[in-house]
Image (cartoon, coloured by chain):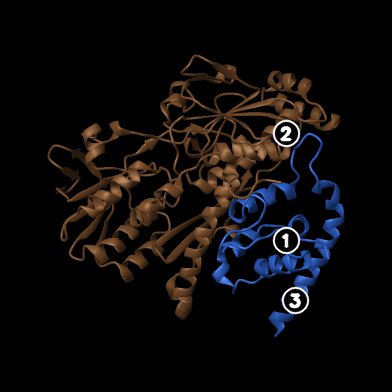
Amino acid sequence: MTCIARGWAQGLSRLALALAGAMALSPAGAAAPSGVPSAVERWAAACNGCHGARGEGSGAIPALRGQSRDALRATLLAWQQDEASDQRHVMVRVLKPLDPALLEGLAQHYGTPP
Amino acid sequence: MTLHRRDALKVLGAAGLATALGRRALAASPSSSGSVLILGAGFAGASLAWALKRWAPSLAVTVVASPARYWTCPFSNTALLEPDTTDALEVRYGAFQAPGAPTLIRAKVVAVEPEHRALVLEDGRRLSADKLVLAPGVEFASDAIEGYDADAEHRFPHAWEAGPSTLTLAQRLRAVPDGGLVVMTIPPNPYRCPPGPYERASLIAWWLQRHRPRSKLLLLDGKDQFTKDSLFKAAWAARYGNLEWQGLSDGAGLRRVSARENLIETDFDRFTPALANVIPPQRAPALLRQAGLDGGQGWCPVEPTGFESSLARDVHILGDAAIANPMPKSAFAANSQGKACAAALLADLAGEPRPAPVLLNTCYSLVAPDAGIAIVGSYAVQAGKLVTLSEGSGLSPSRGALGTQGDAVRAAEAAHARGWYASIRADAFREGPPWP
């Protein structure tokens, strides 16, 4: 119970950080005029290696594009924090090094606004 | 912008690159200008070309690829079980015909001139650009095995390039009589697709079990450890009594082959199998080695942020031909490197510092048609070297850890492997529905 509560609190604080990060991200989220991609764009490009050129997914690999931002953010946070979902161990590992601002940036990049 | 450029000049100037950058800094403008020439349209070269076009549509991007047809190595092992699916491995490059696509030239390249960032084509044309990127894949080191001549390659097909060679191996497998011995020889590291031989072994054992129940598959490995070995070995112990693996310490190192004698000779033993799949050692293609880009090492050293050659300025080397340890020589790594290189090239052309590369790898392997395992790697540059981030890396859970969920998890990973294959083709080659 304590563990669950702590995990939830951590989730909330991560979310708060993520939201704070999102504001700073807006300028960085778009490509610079030179075409040099932002951190979010470079990460999204990496995601596309498994999720398809537009994040459209294929077969058992889910689509990222078209999910609601809230749902996508919740899924990304859950994978990043939940070691128990080892069936998705690839995602648990890939998301581990991402900071909250990047995670939020990816939710914004692929997700549809509320 | 000006500040960035000045900072970059300072940093790169310290590294002795100021002259080259000066030329680029003059060319830098608010919209991307400059040109990139790419050798190779496999997972590295094609991914790079499309990433450049995504981020800088006005950039001149030219890809030179072999006129020969191209079938992907990923998923070619499953075509040994279902040869009719070999057709589906072919990349047809349809998206390169669309407006705004990178320019694709199908031609044989006879020389690389790093000092001019140029490629010389067989028809005499000489192409050059501000940035030259080489992503040519591997060459088979036939001289590394005694007796490995054209007859031996025919007799012991490697099928380590997909397509007709895959079909040949599939047909030879079907010609093995029940009770006949099948041998695979696996090279020492490094080579293209580290888990590939073990996935192939699993699928051949699966096929033999059903169609040649008295036959045996013997793996003769030029090393003692291999990627995902704990998972592969557990799967083999549980599933395939017909498979035996011998490592270098067991005397399995390949010493000699002879097509005439149908002979596979190791440090300890001699075999005359019904079928041998000899996977030769590999190296960077002669084109790159003749240009001095391997520094005599067989593979090409690069710096890890933009995969620029350690030996030639403004020449970048991606995919299997590069030394990108600890990244493996995989299609996934090549795709990831292509995108990281694209970001670095655009920064270079704009006179900005190169951004930190996002480098990932996931290798799915099938241990049976409906059972998969995976290894994940996340990488970063620390103190100028590429390192594995332990918290972003690891293996599929073991059967012991999965308990009763074992079969479901392995089945899910097999399904992920198939989904991944469709996705990475869409990403690298822009296959699938038209790009909006």
Tell me, yes or no, whether the two marked residues, 1 and 2, touch with CB atoms within 8 Å.
Answer: no
Q: Which residue is mark 3?
A: A8
Q: Residues within 10 Å of mark 3 (few under 14, many from 20)?
A: few
Q: Amino acid at mark 2?
A: Ala
Q: Which mark is on residue B294?
A: none
Q: Which mark is on residue B347?
A: 2
For disc 2, the chain is: B
Q: Amino acid at mark 3?
A: Trp
Mark in front: 1 vs 3: 1
Q: Which chain is brown?
A: B
The image quadrant of residue B351 is top right
Vertical side of B222 occupied by B376: above or below: below
Q: Are marks 1 and 2 on the same chain?
A: no
Q: Report, in whole angstroms, how far the alpha carbon at label 1 lies from the one at label 3.
A: 26 Å
Q: Report, in whole angstroms, how far the alpha carbon at label 3 lies from the one at label 2.
A: 40 Å
Residue B153 place in picture, x, y as percent: 26, 37
Give me the residue at 60% from left, 44% from top. Answer: B430
Q: Which residue is mark 1?
A: A66
Mark in front: 1 vs 2: 1
For disc 1, the chain is: A
Q: Residues within 10 Å of mark 2 (few under 14, many from 20)?
A: many
Q: Is residue B149 visible?
A: no
Q: Which chain is blue?
A: A
- Position of B274 with respect to A5 (left or right) is left
Q: Report, in whole angstroms, how far the alpha carbon at label 1 lies from the one at label 2.
A: 30 Å
Give me the residue at 64% from left, 53% from top. Answer: A47
Give me the residue at 83% from left, 30% from top. Answer: B30
